[in-house]
Image (cartoon, helix red, strand yellow):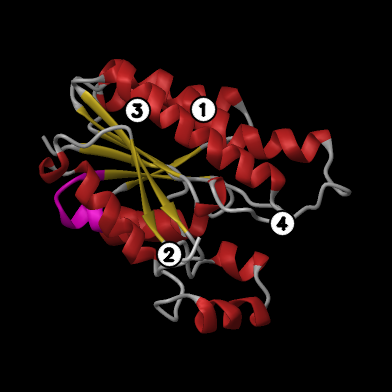
């Protein structure tokens, strides 16, 4: 039986690239989606995986997804906690609802999913997607930055708790050429990245997927509790 991987936010961007990379390496990939049903089904057909729906704002959906995986497969080898939302908002515009929505999707949903699925992971690896925003001063990204900083704290805590059988790490991208970047960055912002990042370009989703691929492989068997930055050199001068 193939090893089983679940990738949240798997239908687009970093998630889709990760699904393709893991499939090439022989994993059977469950492609989680919320709104991007068409893309998830197309990707599943392309790589021979399975789309699986859950609205990560709803704990009930998360439980249903986890139970489906348990009942159908009975095991999980790789969990990629990748899905996330990013709303640009200043302190003036911040509301309780918007703040906790971001924490729910980016932080709590993946913590809950990890709790539900680790009982069927005899061994394996879990990757969270963080961001350089967890450490860099980032105007108008309060809830997003807070959620990503929380992820990094959880990674360290879980690494200590779940060792030696399950390894936990995170990747922290900077600007990555995805739909989320296009939504939150103007053309002028994207040009600034190209002019000011040492590598003169944003990351590609494949860059992040390759780091994830390494971290879940046996080559990283003694790496746990770490956050790996993939940022086109954005943080070099910080």
Query: Tag 1 or tag 2, which sits nearer the N-term?
Result: 1
Q: Are marks 1 and 3 in contact (CB under 8 Å)?
A: no
Task: From the top left corner, tell me how far across and down residue 213 is, in percent.
Answer: 23, 51
Query: Tag 4 or tag 1, which sits nearer the N-term?
Result: 1
- Residue 72, numbered label: none
Farthest residue in the front direction? 237
Left or right, residue 163 beside residue 118: left
Front residue (pair 138, 8): 138
- Residue 236, numbered label: 2
Left or right, residue 163 beside residue 150: left
Task: From the top left corner, tell me how far across and down residue 41 is, in percent.
Answer: 42, 55
Q: How far apart in space, not on screen, are marks 1 and 4 (Cα)?
A: 31 Å
Which segment did they paint magenta? 21-28
* Residue beneath disc 4: 139
The quarter holding residue 199 reads bottom left
Query: Tag 4 or tag 2, which sits nearer the N-term?
Result: 4
Q: Within 10 Å of the Cα at label 4, are there few (<14), some (14-19), or many (20+) other Cα atoms?
A: few
* Residue beneath disc 3: 69
The quarter holding residue 193 reads bottom right
Report the number of numbered marks: 4
The quarter holding residue 200 reads bottom left
Q: Within 10 Å of the Cα at label 3, are there few (<14), some (14-19), or many (20+) other Cα atoms?
A: some
Query: Tag 4 or tag 3, which sits nearer the N-term?
Result: 3
Report the mark closest to the observer, 1 or 3: 1
Report the mark closest to the observer, 3 or 4: 4
Residue 47 included in the magenta stretch of the image: no
Query: Tag 3 or tag 2, which sits nearer the N-term?
Result: 3
């Amino acid at each position: 039986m193939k090893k089983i991987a679940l990738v949240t936010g798997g239908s687009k961007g970093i998630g889709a690239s990760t699904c393709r990379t893991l499939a090439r390496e022989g994993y059977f990939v469950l492609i989680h989606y919320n709104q991007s049903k068409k893309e998830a089904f197309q990707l599943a057909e392309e790589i021979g995986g399975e789309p699986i729906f859950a609205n990560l704002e709803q704990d009930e959906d998360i439980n249903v997804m986890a139970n489906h995986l348990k009942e159908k497969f009975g095991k999980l080898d790789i969990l990629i906690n990748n899905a996330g939302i990013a709303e640009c908002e200043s302190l003036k515009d911040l509301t309780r609802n918007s703040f906790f929505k971001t924490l729910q999707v980016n932080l709590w949903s993946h913590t809950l999913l990890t709790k539900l699925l680790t009982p069927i992971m005899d061994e394996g690896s879990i990757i969270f997607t963080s961001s350089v925003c967890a450490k860099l001063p980032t105007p108008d990204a309060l809830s997003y930055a807070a959620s990503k900083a929380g992820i990094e704290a959880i990674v360290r805590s879980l690494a200590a708790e779940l060792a030696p059988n399950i390894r936990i790490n995170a990747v922290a991208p900077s600007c990555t050429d995805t739909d989320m970047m296009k939504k939150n960055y103007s053309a002028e912002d994207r040009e600034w990245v190209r002019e000011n990042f040492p590598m003169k370009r944003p990351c590609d989703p494949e860059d992040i997927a390759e780091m994830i691929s390494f971290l879940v492989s046996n080559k990283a068997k003694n790496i746990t509790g770490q956050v790996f930055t993939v940022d086109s050199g954005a943080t070099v001068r910080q």
